[in-house]
Image: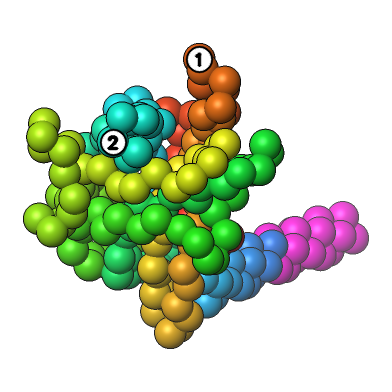
């Protein structure tokens, strides 16, 4: 009688073990299916510490651009992204407060970065090469015209991005907002050096 009970218990334990293994296998299969079909976009960039505010040259009524020399791109997503264009964007305003670059009334300078594709979990460093046609001062620094009565200038980067599902996006990222009217200039860093800033998705 005891042998029959023990035999039944062993069969039950065996069945439970088989069921547990089957459940684990099913769970792993569902997880792998989810991972294979769950797409994550996460594209970021870092500036470094060699980017400063556009330096006002009041004698020539222009801004002098210093740095950065390079940008680092980080793809923490699980699929590729294409970066088609990178631009410096500056917003000069008479407003006392501003921390964004609107769509109109901007000074735009190409960063000279050729289109590239960044793969998942990849890090790419790109050097900045200003256009040969860009206006320069006697020292060879890139400059752009200062507008009348400007009180504040906001410095931004603009990126044109395309993802594998044919989604194209233009992301405008503000990085520095600088007050010019009361030297020493009141500057607000809208980024932290070497800390990745999200480009896409916004």
Q: Depth check: give the residue in front, 112 or 187.
A: 187
Residue 200, placed above or below residue 136:
below
Q: Residue at x 48, y 45 (%)?
A: 148
Give the SS element for disc 2. loop
In the image, taking residue 128 as reference, residue 132 lies left or right, namely left
Say if mark 2 contacts mark 1, CB within 8 Å.
Answer: no
Q: Residues within 10 Å of mark 2 (few under 14, many from 20)?
A: few
Residue 169, placed above or below residue 107:
below
Q: Position of residue 158 (x, y in %)?
A: 42, 58
| Closer to the eye: label 2 or 1 | 2
Q: Position of residue 154 (x, y in %)?
A: 51, 43
Name the magenta segment's main secondary structure. helix
8 in the magenta segment: yes
Q: Position of residue 93 (x, y in %)?
A: 57, 47
Q: Quadrant of residue 137?
A: top left
Write down the residue under mark 2. Answer: 60
- Residue 102 numbered tag: none
- Residue 184 numbered tag: 1
Alpha carbon distance from label 2 to label 1: 19 Å
Q: Depth check: give the residue in front, 162 or 174.
A: 174
Observer able to see residue 154:
no
In the image, taking residue 70 as reference, residue 15 lies left or right, namely right
Observer able to see residue 5:
yes
Q: Position of residue 85 (x, y in %)?
A: 30, 65
In the image, taking residue 167 as reference, residue 108 lies left or right, namely left
115 in the magenta segment: no
Magenta part of the chain? 1-19
Q: Quadrant of residue 10?
A: bottom right
């Amino acid at each position: 009688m005891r042998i029959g009970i023990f035999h039944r218990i062993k069969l039950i334990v065996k069945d439970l073990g088989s069921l547990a293994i089957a459940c684990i296998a099913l769970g792993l299969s569902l997880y792998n299916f989810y991972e294979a079909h769950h797409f994550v976009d996460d594209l970021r960039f870092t500036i470094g510490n060699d980017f400063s505010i556009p330096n006002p040259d009041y004698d020539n009524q222009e801004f002098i651009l210093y740095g950065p020399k390079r940008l680092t791109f980080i793809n923490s997503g699980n699929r590729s992204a294409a970066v088609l264009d990178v631009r410096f964007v500056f917003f000069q305003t008479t407003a006392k407060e501003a921390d964004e670059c609107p769509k109109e009334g901007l000074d735009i300078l190409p960063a000279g970065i050729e289109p590239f594709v960044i793969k998942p979990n990849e890090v790419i460093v790109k050097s900045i090469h200003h256009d040969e046609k860009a206006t320069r001062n006697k020292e060879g620094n890139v400059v752009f015209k200062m507008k009348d009565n400007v009180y504040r200038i906001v410095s931004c980067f603009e990126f044109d991005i395309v993802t594998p599902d044919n989604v194209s996006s233009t992301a405008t990222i503000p990085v520095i907002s600088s007050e010019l009217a009361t030297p020493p200039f009141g500057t607000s860093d809208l980024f932290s050096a070497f800390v990745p800033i999200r480009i896409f998705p916004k």
